[in-house]
Amino acid sequence: MYVIVKKILFLFDPEYAHHLAIFGLRFIDKIGLLALICEKPKCVPRIVCGIKFENPVGLAAGFDKNAEYIDLMAKLGFGFIEVGTLTPLPQPGNAKPRSFRLTKEEGIINRFGFNNIGIDKAIENIKNIKFSGVLGINIGKNLNTPLENAIEDYLICFRKAYLYASYIVINISSPNTKGLRKLQSNKFFEDLIKEIKLEQTKLNLLHDKYIPFLVKISPDVNNTDLDNICSNILKYKVDGVIATNTTISRDKVKSNSLYSEEGGLSGKPLTEMAMKTQKYICKRLKNKIPIIGVGGIMSADDGIDRIKNGANLIQIYSGLIFRGHRLIYEICKRIK
């Protein structure tokens, strides 16, 4: 069935197709068909970061930027949902068109630029959901916030998300906010993580509730910066790592006319890079810190490979677009 749906959706611009897909899902849910199409994946629950996950396949950040579709997407069978990236203030993101589908290569280039309604309105959306499963909230900095003031943006979002998230993600790896990836460098990374850890400790004492935070990193980081990132993750006892975000590399798509479009590349062209980065991180962290593997998971084989190579959990986004929700079930069937 999804083969037919995909052919229709792929007739449209990717961003418009996204909204069209959501409209379609809402319609079939309203008439009661979604429950018939989507069964609950059978999988042994696992504990990661002190949280119980019904299954290890989650929805990656970026699909539901404003926490508007949590209840809907949960019905597809995801073991957890991550929303965002959210910033302190609303922002429109980059100019359209800002998403490009590389159909032959099964990839997507996007340069959305953290378009979102802002953390306050998103939290109001979260307050009204029925979903009681694991919810991650992904946070970032506003475009107009100077890099030297970025920590305050993250702290603002961290405080506001704390009581409503199962876990919080510090996104410092999107290529679509100018200068953001510099936060992964030695100059900025330790200061940021130290402040977030201090805030986590304060909020834990204040609310008697410990909410883990994870750092989302880029597949384009060099080994020197990765070594520094991993050292500080261990030093400050960061709760987890998400590996990886999209890539600015175009090595796998040079024959496509869209290869020169600016933005982060996801999907099948990212599979190898994301795996390589994950393996390196696992080795440096000596399997002491949980890892969520994401990026280029397009098949059950990809998902199982990520888990076999150190990921405690995985997330999909482009795989959902190109394969449909059955990918969740196919991965869960293979997990022992």
Image (cartoon, rainbow, N blue to C red):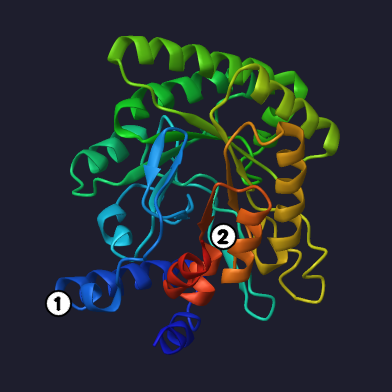
Res 100 seen here: yes
The quarter in which the N terminus is drawn is: bottom left
Q: Secondary structure at mark 2?
A: loop
Res 182 seen here: no
Answer left or right for 226 relative to 316.
Answer: right
Q: Residue at x 41, y 44 (%)?
A: 116
User: The disc labelled 2 sits on which kind of residue?
Assistant: Arg
The image shows residue 140, relative to residue 187, as above or below, that is below
Q: Residue at x 37, y 65 (%)?
A: 42
Answer left or right for 30 relative to 233.
Answer: left
Q: Give percent across and percent down for residue 151.
A: 55, 20
The image shows residue 265, relative to residue 299, as above or below, that is above
Q: State the residue in front, 174 or 178.
A: 174
Q: Earlier in the sequence, mark 1 or mark 2?
A: 1
Q: State the residue in front, 13 or 320.
A: 320
Q: Give percent across and percent down for residue 263.
A: 66, 55
Q: Give percent across and percent down for residue 170.
A: 53, 33
Q: Nearer the viewer, mark 1 or mark 2?
A: 1
Q: Give percent across and percent down for residue 316.
A: 52, 60
Q: Which residue is mark 2?
A: 98
Q: Do the residues under discs 1 and 2 have CB atoms within 8 angstroms?
A: no
State the residue lying farthest toward the left.
31
Q: Which residue is mark 1?
A: 31
Q: Residue at x 47, y 78 (%)?
A: 12
Report which quarter residue 204 is drawn in: top left
CA gap between label 1 and label 2 equals: 33 Å
The image shows residue 66, relative to residue 288, as above or below, that is below
Q: Residues within 10 Å of mark 2 (few under 14, many from 20)?
A: some
User: The disc labelled 1 sits on which kind of residue?
Assistant: Ile
